[in-house]
């Protein structure tokens, strides 16, 4: 299959390489001039999309997605499927789909490691016929894809998931900082909570306390992993969506404020999102 791939950054570069390794003809473009093994280099987004049966985008935000979509939609061949894997606002996903109905919004979970290993999870929105074209490519780049509903449903699933993740990570870190003050050993706290009703992915699979639980960014001096600024981006997208539809999300709102302080006013930029634990520990000493 001839695939145009636009946005060859930390995630997209690996995803394009995996598609090329699986035997697809992949033509890629990135404004940063990135080159990827096995991927032909185009000079523009339109150059990558020209003659493609599928175009995949993996871009920083909705504004950039809309500008790339405006450039490529006029030259897409009839029957071409447009798959956006970026994490963007629901409105941008729906705007692209209204201009090119054979579109899928398919944000991912699994991070750079998952993109490299081809083990991402795709949450997809769009018409059945577009999902049917995209699904075999999701199987190459990932290990699971869920067709969540109409256009925008993939982005909706992504931001709801990450709103839960952001809030649970914060409260997991708060609980460790409180346990420290109460003289409760961190390992004992993990042993209890990870098998009790306070368990969560943040505690059990990605424990924010170094040396406790399975290996996680906490064991690597909080190198990401999933950077705090990306969590902030997703929490803001969740708040934008909540305001647009009038949903009450008080904890999601507060999680966004905490990550904003951490990333924008403190030293959180470039650290893993689980570095909220040393942040709370430091605050507690003041
Ligand atoms: P990145 O910044 O590494 O990659 C984005 C790439 O897009 C860059 O290489 C940039 O040069 C390119 N780009 C920007 N504008 C462009 C344009 N107009 N035309 C062509 N290329 C352009 O980001 P990333 O980590 O690869 O993330 C990509 C998307 O995936 C984001 O929406 C992010 O929120 C989402 N995501 C990231 C992760 C993660 O762990 N990094 C996890 C899940 C989802």
Image (tube, rainbow, N blue to C red):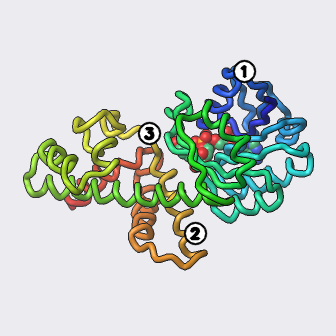
| Percent x, y of residue 255 | 40, 64
Residue under the image location 76 percent in, 40 percent down:
31
Tell whether label 3 touches label 2 (CB within 8 Å).
no
x then y, percent, for residue 213: 24, 38
- What residue is rendered at 28% in x and 48% in y? 203
Callout 3 crowding tier (Cα within 10 Å): few <14, some 14–19, many ≥20: many
Of 122 and 249, the residue lying toward us? 122
Q: Mark 2 points at which residue?
A: 241
Helix, strand or loop at label 1? It is loop
Is the C-beta of the residue carrying label 2 under 8 Å from the nearest atom of ligand 1? no
At label 1, counting other C-alpha atoms closer than 10 Å, the crowd grade (few under 14, some 14-19, many 20 or more) is: few
Instruction: Looking at the image, tell me whether mark 1 or mark 3 is earlier in sequence order.
Output: 1
Camera-nearest residue between 247 and 231? 247
Using the numbered discs, state the Cα–Cα distance from disc 2 to disc 3 in whole angstroms.
25 Å
Ligand number 1: quarter of image = top right
Q: Mark 1 points at which residue?
A: 23
Name the N-terminal-most of marks 2 and 3.
3
Q: Mark 3 points at which residue?
A: 225
Q: Is residue 128 above or below residue 111?
A: below
**Cβ of disc 3 within 8 Å of ligand 1?**
yes
- Mark 1–mark 3 distance (CA, rounded to whole Å): 29 Å
In the image as oriented, which residue stretches furthest toward the bottom? 246
In screen coordinates, is 282 left or right of 34? left
């Amino acid at each position: 299959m001839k695939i145009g791939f636009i946005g060859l950054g930390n995630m997209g570069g690996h995803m394009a390489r995996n598609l090329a390794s699986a035997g697809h003809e992949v033509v890629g473009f990135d404004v940063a001039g990135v080159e990827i093994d096995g991927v032909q280099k185009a000079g523009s987004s339109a150059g990558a999309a020209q003659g493609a049966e599928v175009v995949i985008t993996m871009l920083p935000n909705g504004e950039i997605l809309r500008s790339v979509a405006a450039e490529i939609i006029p030259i897409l061949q009839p029957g071409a499927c447009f798959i956006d894997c970026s994490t963007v606002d629901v409105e941008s996903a729906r705007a692209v789909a209204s201009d090119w109905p054979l579109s899928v919004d398919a944000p991912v979970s699994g991070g750079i490691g998952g993109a490299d290993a081809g083990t991402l999870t795709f949450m997809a929105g769009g018409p059945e016929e577009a999902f049917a074209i995209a699904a075999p490519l999701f199987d190459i780049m990932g290990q699971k894809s869920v067709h969540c509903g109409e256009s925008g449903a993939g982005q909706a699933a992504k931001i709801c998931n990450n709103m839960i993740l952001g809030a649970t990570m914060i409260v997991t870190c708060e609980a460790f900082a409180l346990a420290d003050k109460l003289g409760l050993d961190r390992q004992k706290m993990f042993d209890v909570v990870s098998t009790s009703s306070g368990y969560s992915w943040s505690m059990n699979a990605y424990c924010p306390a170094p040396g406790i639980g399975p290996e996680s960014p906490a064991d690597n001096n909080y190198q990401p992993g999933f950077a705090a600024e990306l969590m902030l981006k997703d929490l803001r997208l969740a708040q934008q969506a909540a305001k647009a539809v009038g949903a009450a999300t008080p904890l999601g709102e507060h999680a966004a404020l905490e990550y904003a302080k951490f990333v924008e006013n403190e030293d959180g930029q470039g650290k893993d999102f689980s570095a909220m634990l040393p942040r709370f520990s430091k605050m507690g000493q003041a």
